[in-house]
Image (cartoon, rainbow, N blue to C red):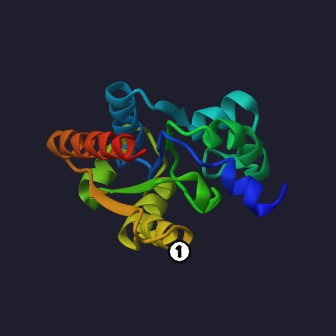
Amino acid sequence: MSDNEQDASFERTNANILITGTPGTGKSTLAELVSEATGLNYINVGELVKEKGLHEGFDQEFQSYILDDDKVIDELEQVVSKGGNIIDFHSCDLFPERWFDLVLVLRTDNTILYNRLEKRGYSQKKITENIESEIFQVILEEARESYSNEIVVELQSNTIQDMESNASRIEQWVDDYKAKN
């Protein structure tokens, strides 16, 4: 398939949104809220990896699956090309830039994040790794390096009010996108 044919296959009337961020920032909750309000198809990549075996095994030290990037991309390519999806994943650099119309990076205060991860039963090593990732803005920088700055938006996700405000902003953005297309 030529680049032009591939680009044409991604012309769509419904948006694709990526919600990313350090584990514990509220990606799944926000994605589910927005999906319910907008009718966008919600895809939790972490759950998809487990359900469809899109991994190369399990990392005991970090208690997580070792992602097979190619299998994930192959699994999602057709559904994403149609548009109308909200994708939730803690990383973003594996996805093609052409897939998304909006990339949201959720950020959370370190103390709040620590408490959330502790409540999940994460090991101290895993909590420390995720807190350091948040401090050094690893996911935000990854998004800025992987996608056009015009589509990357940083959102605070510390409180229920933040979550509600973020959901309203995204719903409005989806409405505006639909009106333009």
| Quadrant for the C terminus in the image | top left
- Observer-nearest of 109 and 103: 103
Furthest residue in direction right, as rendered: 1
- The local secondary structure at tag 1 comes to helix
| Residue at 50% from the left image edge and 40% from the top image edge | 13
State how many labels appear.
Answer: 1
Furthest residue in direction left, as rendered: 161
- Observer-nearest of 135 and 181: 181
Where residue 43 sits in the image (x, y, percent)? 54, 34
Q: Is residue 58 visible?
A: no
Mark 1 burial class by Cα count in 10 Å: few <14, some 14-19, many 20+: few
55 on left or right of 164:
right
| Residue at 25% from the left image edge and 59% from the top image edge | 109
Amino acid at pointer 1? Glu
| Residue at 20% from the left image edge and 39% from the top image edge | 164
Where residue 65 sits in the image (x, y, percent)? 68, 44
Up the image or down, 70 lies above or below 151; here it is: above
Q: Which residue is mark 1?
A: 145
| Residue at 14% from the left image edge and 42% from the top image edge | 161
Where residue 15 sits in the image (x, y, percent)? 47, 44
178 on left or right of 166:
right
Where residue 149 sits in the image (x, y, percent)? 42, 71
Up the image or down, 112 lies above or below 78; here it is: below
| Quadrant for the N terminus in the image | bottom right
15 on left or right of 10:
left
Q: Is residue 71 visible?
A: yes
